[in-house]
Image (cartoon, coloured by chain):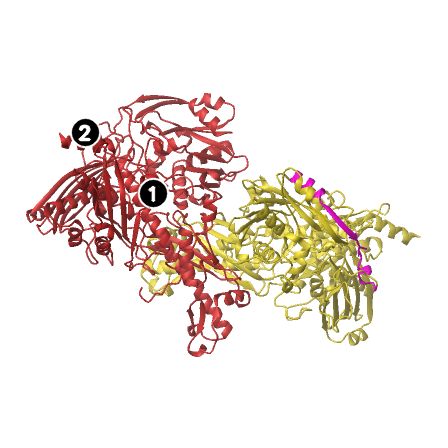
Chain colours: A red, B yellow
Amino acid sequence: MSEHKFKYVGTRPIRHDGVDKVTGRADFGADFSLPGMIYAACARSPHAHARILSIDTSKAEALAGVCAVITGKDLPEVPSFWNGTVEQGLDFGELADRIIARDKALFHGHPVAAVAAVSEHVAREACKLIDVEYEVLKPVMTIDDALADDAPILHPDQEPLGFDPKPEKPSNNARRISFQRGNLEEGFDAADIVVEREFETVMVHQGYIEPHACVVRSNEDGRIVIWCSTQGPFLVQLFSALVLGMDPASIKVIPSEIGGGFGGKTTIYLEPLAIVLSRKAGRPVKMVMSREEVFRATGPNSGAKVTLRLGAKSDGTLVAADTQMWFEAGAYRGSPVGGACMTIFGTYRIPHFSIEGFDVVLNKPQVAAYRAPGAPIGNFAIEQCMDELALELGIDPIELRLRNAVVEGDHAPYGPAYQAIGLRETLQAAKNHPHYKAPLAENQGRGVACGFWFNAGLQSSAIVGLNSDGSAIVRTGNPDIGGSRVSMAIMAAEELGIPVERIRPTVGDTDSIGYGDLTGGSRVTYATGMAVIQAAQDVIEQLRARAAMIWDVDVEDVVWKDGATVGTNGASDKDPLSLAELAGQMADTGGPIMGRASVNAATAGPAFATHLCDLEVDQETGRSKVVRYTTIQDAGRAIHPGYVEGQFQGGAAQGIGWALNEEYLWDEDGAVDNASFLDYRIPVASDLPMIDTVIVEVPSSGHPYGIRGVGEVPIVPPLATVANAMHDATGIRFDQLPLSPPRVLDAIEKRQS
Amino acid sequence: MSEHKFKYVGTRPIRHDGVDKVTGRADFGADFSLPGMIYAACARSPHAHARILSIDTSKAEALAGVCAVITGKDLPEVPSFWNGTVEQGLDFGELADRIIARDKALFHGHPVAAVAAVSEHVAREACKLIDVEYEVLKPVMTIDDALADDAPILHPDQEPLGFDPKPEKPSNNARRISFQRGNLEEGFDAADIVVEREFETVMVHQGYIEPHACVVRSNEDGRIVIWCSTQGPFLVQLFSALVLGMDPASIKVIPSEIGGGFGGKTTIYLEPLAIVLSRKAGRPVKMVMSREEVFRATGPNSGAKVTLRLGAKSDGTLVAADTQMWFEAGAYRGSPVGGACMTIFGTYRIPHFSIEGFDVVLNKPQVAAYRAPGAPIGNFAIEQCMDELALELGIDPIELRLRNAVVEGDHAPYGPAYQAIGLRETLQAAKNHPHYKAPLAENQGRGVACGFWFNAGLQSSAIVGLNSDGSAIVRTGNPDIGGSRVSMAIMAAEELGIPVERIRPTVGDTDSIGYGDLTGGSRVTYATGMAVIQAAQDVIEQLRARAAMIWDVDVEDVVWKDGATVGTNGASDKDPLSLAELAGQMADTGGPIMGRASVNAATAGPAFATHLCDLEVDQETGRSKVVRYTTIQDAGRAIHPGYVEGQFQGGAAQGIGWALNEEYLWDEDGAVDNASFLDYRIPVASDLPMIDTVIVEVPSSGHPYGIRGVGEVPIVPPLATVANAMHDATGIRFDQLPLSPPRVLDAIEKRQS
């Protein structure tokens, strides 16, 4: 890495899509329209758990302006071979059933029918006219209820995965995941001190601003065009095709701009219904969720129960750890408990540990990915126990973490050894940061916590094309959520040696660019960036050949330097040819030049962060306020520092909201009671201080520029950081989230009495 | 070529864009809309030649609903460096002046101002409110008037090109082109017979069904997006940028579907005006021409005057030829006289010749390209003289042509030697065709003529991407006029060994694909096809490497055969891996696979045709009817025979219309008198018999599949073929077009008296 002298990497140019986005011109999921387009809506189950006895759509069909009505019967039977076929972490049988209920409604808001009509209003009115006869069943709403012996079983014929021996009777405990190292007993025997705790977190939503939306056109020849807001157009193509038993090649997906996803837009909800409605009505169909539908029927993050036992020597050296985690999966398998298992002990050297995770189905919406899926929940447990150890042993909490922090060569709990990583560097930076030394006022407390996320690599494709005027295009298949267009342009600019402004980065649809995995897993700048760099180098190889032709020399005697071809050896007498000069001569030297590259980045650079939080607690009301917050994270290499900082701040803000206020409230029938941004409280600007950021750069060895994904780690430490600050401010250790005023006040009063 | 055994080439699959086009779903230039879009129209000069003294737009600006009004003053001064800079055959100074008149209106319909308003109606009303003070000048409407000593000079300060010595005074004779071979005097001295004639053709329009249309959005950051109907998106990008003094990289052009172009959509008319209006109004602007505007103010083909002297031996061997051609350029330089000079003697061996062509400016709309630009006019002269020679010498007209026909190794009039060509093969096929032997009824005559077009190669880019389901995408930058999507898919299918239906061909915008020259010059199937084939081979190279990895063998031991990798030598024990199998494993073998290629096809395979026409003439009315027509042409290799035949038939139909009925009628003020499809008569289905086609295949040596462009040659012979048939039916040699009933009747009556 060191030999790299960067010209554009590390600068902060304006993003190419910036003006369109601040002026409201950018087209998001609901902004697209087609001639003759009609509007669709879903009829949803008013029960969290019910058998569907009959559906009568005749009244709805009779309503003026209704073009098509469908139920589960209008979709293909879930092919048996799907059941159990988990692709991209998804069981397609369950996906198909979740899109629209067949025999059973499994959560409040579960679609049971859909209507397309001349207006959204008519469509929603028609939904009310659909008569569904239900046999209401007892909803299973908590992990304890779900695991109770007499619990109603959501999927009686589903075989739980990962249990050995296989359970003899059906269960809501759908999957078991585990990692072990060393010998637990031995480990705890060697411990001078053991902390044992139990924690609970509740279901929270990603809170993306843009609701799910799509426009779908079914052509006469059976081809489908989908315009939608998604983190992965190729994933929408594959999932929609599988749910409908179609050939993916017959579906074209055009990703719109995306107004936030945070993992919540890595699956589908509306598209297959819109396809079937469009086919039936013979018109293009627009389908847009209301905010209420987003809360009731899209995938939030799991609520969870975590038990943790942590043993250490008196000098603070960790010797053993044991955890069990139960995650709410919602109505179908697929909670992020795996992510929690992979990360909970990923930050520290622990010679002996046991990790066990369970995926529990219950009558809530099926959870979806949410920024570093699972990790913040495990982190909430481990980092509070670390805080407690530090207090009991009288060791500075950063010092304690430094003593145990993993370094290059240490193994992750899930196996592989870490390459170069920057955990210690973030701890050192935290220790030396003015924030850590600043005095605290009355009723204020300070918390510290570290966080870890492994990051994804996966598949990406990129094209770089040269224009005769010396400008260039960059095309990838990844929707731009956090500024990836400009990041791709910066990397292409770095290779080609032309200004970022002369590069036009675009996001392709599934017909116009090679396969690319989704925008998620903090992978785009890393893996798609790699593809862009390689595609630019492919262009440069062709430029060298053109220069060799122009100079009539061996291509070996032409090197690329500072955006120009330079002659060496036999060609050292030649004047360098700039990219612009070579581009201008493309026509005469063999035609246009395009570079292409595709990668499957096996591993992404794992990333670590240390967070500091000062919290002030009002002893009268229990209301707490974050007065200072600092995120310190290893970015490997910041391509566009402005957007790296934005990721640090955004993740911390979401984590703080999760820690202090966010929670789904349920009524006794299993319906969400606070399905609006008024009643479900995410932090707004006035709730937070300016979040301070420190970018640490320990280059990742897997990437030519040393990049690490930065999008997810920032949400990992805040839950524990805030809880530790709360303990410092109140002396109370909270084992449940959120740390909302009622809970805090209640605890303060209990302590006083 | 011979070793090729084709599986998909030569088949007739349904074009991918077929259903959309027959159901009216395809989006053409006027079908695109944007939120907040407004509508623009042009105020046009009511005089063919006038000095603009003043323009008062105040009344128009005051009209309710008007958003912006512009005149030539709102466009940048024509940068001096442009004058004379002829790029892509275009003088940009003149282009800018033609887009909107500055000091002088040079043709009836010349834009003098433009208005954007809330509706097209309001915009057109506002145009009527613009007061323009003109000093009317005498319009120059014929070649003779233009070249007269006292002729008003359209461009007094423009220096005529190609004259030696330079003319001492300004002239409307703007350019001279010439080719010579041998010694003319010597040639004619050796002739036993000399035919000398003078011919005249009139201005005709391409008659594309879709009028020019665009939607333009000027973004706050100065970037421009243009959606328009064009044969060349990159050309719209470059031309618009030059006219407005912008950086081409700041303009993105999205080509719509195109409803015919025939060369007429290889330049721009509306785009720069729409850009300036959009910038001024801050809204997207739609601009659509009416049919009348298309006739009055877009580029038709030249009217021309041709003198020809042709000498031969008594055995029919040609010995000398001498021609002078004057072409109407319209208000600015740039007639297709060059095309006529290159082709008029391209069909026959002529040891001694002189060709001289002149580009004459006059007060008519500037001409544009029209299918084989210039060639039909020269052909009209040479092929009638050949017919006359045959008659005078008593040699069968096909036999006479066979004796003189060029073959491989003969040189084209413009220099290079022909490689493998198929002129003789088309003549032989004509001779043996039942049509040539069929008896003629009373008042019927038969004509034969040959035609030649050199075809273009130029630059093309293509991307081929593989999907994990074994389907593929093909992306190019060429708007699909004549079925090129399916032709590209056929060639990719041939290389990859997967069905055409599994390939999705798409047309990119200027931000999403490497540079590509326009769809024209019969170059797309040839040159862009070459790029597609190479891009597919790039994919195959990667597939071989993947198979080598999977088998753990040398890539040299992996060959591609019948859509699969097959092991040889060290790998001969391996079972072949199909493309689908390899595609399914892409993720595990290094990620997605994309192929890319760009070409600059220096030469395209020159193409020749022989046409036969039976014409029946009503001696009472002079009305003639084509009763049988056969086109025989060398296609090199027909990728999709259905669309090759379509090109043969379409070109012949246009040529027949040109020969029999089409002409601009002008009033004394230089205004077009018949600016509608009612008064300007192009042939309709009921005017024509089913046109018979014979595809001859003499593979072109320049293309891996032996393709030759086929789009333009079919319009070259019909003018002379019909005229020769007319002579055979009436005994009258017509030297003027069109052969309309009045002219024919008049000639018949003259003959009788």
Left-right relation of A74 to B187: left
User: Which residue matches tag 2?
Assistant: A148
Tag 2 and tag 1, C-beta contact below 8 Å: no
Count neighbours of disc 1 (C-alpha within 10 A) and say few if under 14, some if 14 to 19, many if 20 or more.
many
Left-right relation of A512 to B357: left
Left-right relation of B533 to B416: left
| Amino acid type assigned to the residue bearing label 1 in the image | Gly
- x and y, in percent, of residue A452 in the image: 24, 49
- Residue B605 in the magenta stretch? The answer is no
User: Element under label 1?
Assistant: loop
- Residue B725 in view: yes
Q: Nearer the viewer, mark 2 or mark 1?
A: 1
How many marks the image carries: the answer is 2
**Upstream in the sequence, badge 2 or badge 1?**
2
- x and y, in percent, of residue A603 in the image: 29, 54
Q: Chain of mark 2?
A: A
Comparing A118 with A101, the one in front is A118
Magenta part of the chain: B120-149
User: Element under label 2?
Assistant: loop
Label number found at residue A467: none
- At a point 52% along the width and 23% down the height, the residue shown is A64
Comparing B530 with A264, the one in front is A264
| Amino acid type assigned to the residue bearing label 2 in the image | Ala
- Residue B141 in the magenta stretch? The answer is yes
Relative height, residue B501 to residue B451 (above, below): above
Q: Chain of mark 1?
A: A
User: Which residue matches tag 1?
Assistant: A263
Q: Are marks 2 and 1 on the same chain?
A: yes
Quote the CA–CA distance across marks 2 and 1. Answer: 31 Å
Relative height, residue A539 to residue A521 (above, below): below
